[in-house]
Image: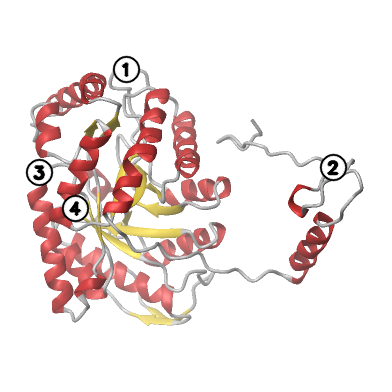
Amino acid sequence: MKFLAITLIAHGPDPLTGETRSTTERFRDVVDSAVLAEELGFDGFGVGERHERPFISSSPPVVLSHIAALTSRIRLFTAVTTLSLLDPVRAYEDYATLDHLSGGRLELIIGKGNGSAQARLFHVTPEDQWDRNREAYELFRRLWREDRVTWEGRFRPSLTDAETWPRPLQRPIRVWHGSATSRDSVDLAARYGDPLFSANVTNPIEPYAELVDHYRERWAHYGHDPADALVGAGSAGFYVARTSQEAIATYRPIYDARIALFRKSGVEPVFHSLEDAVERGSILVGSPQQIIDKVLRYHERLGHEVMHVSADADGLTRAQHREALELFQSDVAPVLRKEIPSRPFPAAPVVPQSADATRQEDTATHQSTVTHPSTVTHPSTVTHPSTEIRHTTVTSTGAPA
């Protein structure tokens, strides 16, 4: 199994302290979380896209570009790119640029998006949102694959032999389809042979499992090999501790504050208590063995190979959240990786070096193998009196720490 840490960059009061961090601090939290996720061994880091309160995730390409500069291995996901709201040409340009800046580590999860306020902001209606999502994806897909595109649709001006720049690094990029409630997104994913990512957050497992079943049925209907279908799934909350008692005691006030906020907003929660959510929902709160058992149960029904946990502290202290992520990676992830085999993520493309870069690399290689009488002879451990290799930690602000 592969593991992603994902944030929608919600920006509001801490559920326990009531403190609200500044917008700048909140963005720095996200970047720090991405660096930590790579350090701890997560396979991917995702940033959502929302255009309404309480979220400040309106520009995932910008956030992910900053993260790309501070990381080197972890794959970068959008969660989700709301193509129903966007011009697919502009979206292509942003993400093709990000794909180069990240060294080919980008993966997209697309969807129509949720929220009535953001739909009004972009003049999208309930009647046309799915048509917009489908049309935007079909054009986006062609732009990624074709150097010149002639196209005509309903929701943006037509294209005639159009070129878009830069041309992408990954050809093609892998696109997942985010699914929460509708068969439209599931059918679109199956038709094009794309992977599906189930939200798996608000409700018990069954409605999500039914959509996954429909995806697999439509996958076969469109002539794809059933063995090639690929599914990911989310989770509704996260805290793992050494014992179940410690996990429940620590997370209870956070969950109770969330329930109170729902009810204040006029929304009756699906799960009436933390114990109910742990029993019937996808929330991952408990001991390592409890988390393992729950993910395995969900896998029996969903058949997913990728899952996400929250990248946000969400009421936990920074120390508590880090400890939980470390415990997940040490005691939970290795077991699930062994029990649930998963296909590898796409390898980053090999980028040809310029002649100047190649000469610099050759020079550096030659220098690193010079042996001095006063040093050991293994090339990787040679030191020179006038130089010292320094390993610098970079903070989210870009300054050395």
Calculate the distance from the C-alpha at mark 2 to the C-alpha at mark 3.
59 Å
**Residue on which disc 1 sits:** 18
Calculate the distance from the C-alpha at mark 4 to the C-alpha at mark 2.
52 Å
Calculate the distance from the C-alpha at mark 2 to the C-alpha at mark 1.
50 Å
Q: Hey, what amino acid is under mark 2?
A: Thr
Point out the tag, 4 or 3, that comes first from the N-terminus.
3
Q: Residue at x 14, y 24 (%)?
A: 264
Q: Residue at x 40, y 60 (%)?
A: 107
Q: Hey, what amino acid is under mark 4?
A: His
SS for dot 4: helix
Classify the position of the C terminus by image quarter. top right
**Residue on which disc 3 sits:** 204
**Residue on which disc 4 sits:** 299
Task: Tell me where residue 323 appears, x and y as whole percent.
Answer: 39, 28
Disc 2 vs disc 3: Cβ atoms closer than 8 Å? no
Q: Residue at x 21, y 26 (%)?
A: 244
Q: Residues within 10 Å of mark 4 (few under 14, many from 20)?
A: some
Mark 4, mark 3: which one is toward the viewer? 4
Task: Tell me where residue 211 appears, x and y as whole percent.
Answer: 12, 59
Point out the tag, 2 or 1, that comes first from the N-terminus.
1
Q: In this view of the protein, which residue sits in the foreground, 296 or 12?
A: 296
**Residue on which disc 2 sits:** 387
Q: Hey, what amino acid is under mark 3?
A: Pro
Up-down relation of residue 311 to residue 119 (above or below):
above
